[in-house]
Image (spheres, rainbow, N blue to C red):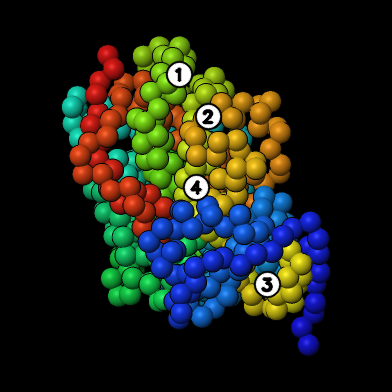
Amino acid sequence: MSQSHSTMPSGFTFGVARGALPVIGHLRKFLWAPLDFLESLPSAGDLVEVRLGTRRAYVACHPELVRRVFADSRLFGKDEPQLKESQQTYGSSLATAPDDQHRRLRRLLQPAFDRSGLAQYGALLERKAALLAGGWQDGQVVDVFPAFCGFATDAVSRALFPGRLGDECLAEVRNLFRKVSEAGEGVGVAAVLTLLRGMNGGRRRRKAVQQLCDVLDRLIVECRAGGSDESDDAFLLSPLFAASAQHSEAETDRMSGPEPVLTDEEVRAQALSLLAAGTHTVATALTWTFHLLSQHPRVERHLHEEVDSVLGGRPAAWADLGSLAFTEHVVTEALRLYPPVWLLMRVTAADATVAGRRLPAGSLILPSPLAVQRRGDIFARPHVFDPDRWLPHRAAAYPRGSFCAFGGGAHKCIGDSFGMAEAVLTLATVAQSWRLRAAPGADLRTNPVALAVHPRRLPMSVHARR
């Protein structure tokens, strides 16, 4: 008999989503209008039952409810069959590891993302952002998501393997990662639909992943053999190599033979996971940000006033982050309106009572950052792009969990600060030189099976400010 839990017996409401169709349930809404559908759910309750085909699932739409689901990873864990399938393809990483392995991996990687560690990547991000802004021509039309995705792939790849990536190798990584992204299963909405509909990219995805893994394996072997050409701690994987080296030396001293903390395959899985997280989150955030700025000239003017005052015509530097408060608010507000991941997936490990509803073990719980971050009872005029809502005195009034674009609890994105810094520096550097305006041919519909939810096509013309 399974153990019963009663973790949230009161204070939340339960409802059932309308509009389920025979056999397919709400799948059509997820596929054709996921943003509108998720945004509508809080009006039905804090925990809302939806139908995905013939399976029932429960979308968490209240910030405190979402926060508690994230916090209790023992009761609300990740789906084991899906984790095993992802591990077979991508390896065991922070994104795919069960709780016990996740804690170990996060502890090993955390030093690379501490405040002191993050500053070491500043010069790298500054250079890449300056190259991006310097590569455009006045009047040129740019499809912004692929442009920002290529930029972010290069930046994260350099942070993973500094001094090891020549231009040819970097282009190979960028091309293969693009193929993996186009063919691969995603997270959030994509993970749910993959679970139910087998949308996994099949042979094309597996081939692209294997080719990318071959390149990463080669780079990892080089790093183990010769170290980094940069300073000892100047790259994201350095804590893993350092821990492996220390463990190997200790084992050798005991005459038991070298045994690294992580195998090359495990290090590669972390590299692949960090590459995906660091690329798509930043590219998606920047894509929606420039789209919103083109529609809100008053916000854009305020942004330009700040970057002109702080930068004075030069590219943004890491030391400028503390002075770019409004720029950071712009990115945060874009993430509120368009979080890269609209749905996350958890499964109850035991019987539980949630929002007054009795759920058996194995029930699918879907915390929704988008549903939470567009609630009108939390954010006044929730559809309005208003970066000033993140001024300290206003942000302090929001309940805990109101902004959850990076997840929460033990599984919160480890690179959230890195990603925000990357997005802020890039936005400031680009906005220093360019205005972006909508161009013909845009398709703002989203693809729910993408790794992160972005417009299908967003061409914008770039116009020099100076």
Mark toward the start of the polypeptide (1 vs 4): 1
Gap between marks 4 and 2 measured at Cα: 15 Å
Q: Which residue is mark 1?
A: 302
Q: Quick check: can you spot residue 86?
A: no
> Which residue is drawn at the image coordinates 36% and 36% (left, top)?
291
Relative to residue 437, is residue 87 depicted above or below?
A: below
Mark 4 lies on a secondary structure that is loop
Q: Which residue is mark 4?
A: 339
Q: Residue furthest front?
A: 19
The quarter of the displayed image where residue 40 is located:
bottom right
The circle on residue 387 is 2
Q: Is residue 116 left or right of residue 297?
A: right
Gap between marks 1 and 4 measured at Cα: 23 Å
Residue 185 is situated, as x and y percent measured from the top left of the image, at: 40, 66
The circle on residue 348 is 3
Relative to residue 5, is residue 169 depicted above or below?
A: above
Residue 89 is situated, as x and y percent measured from the top left of the image, at: 42, 71
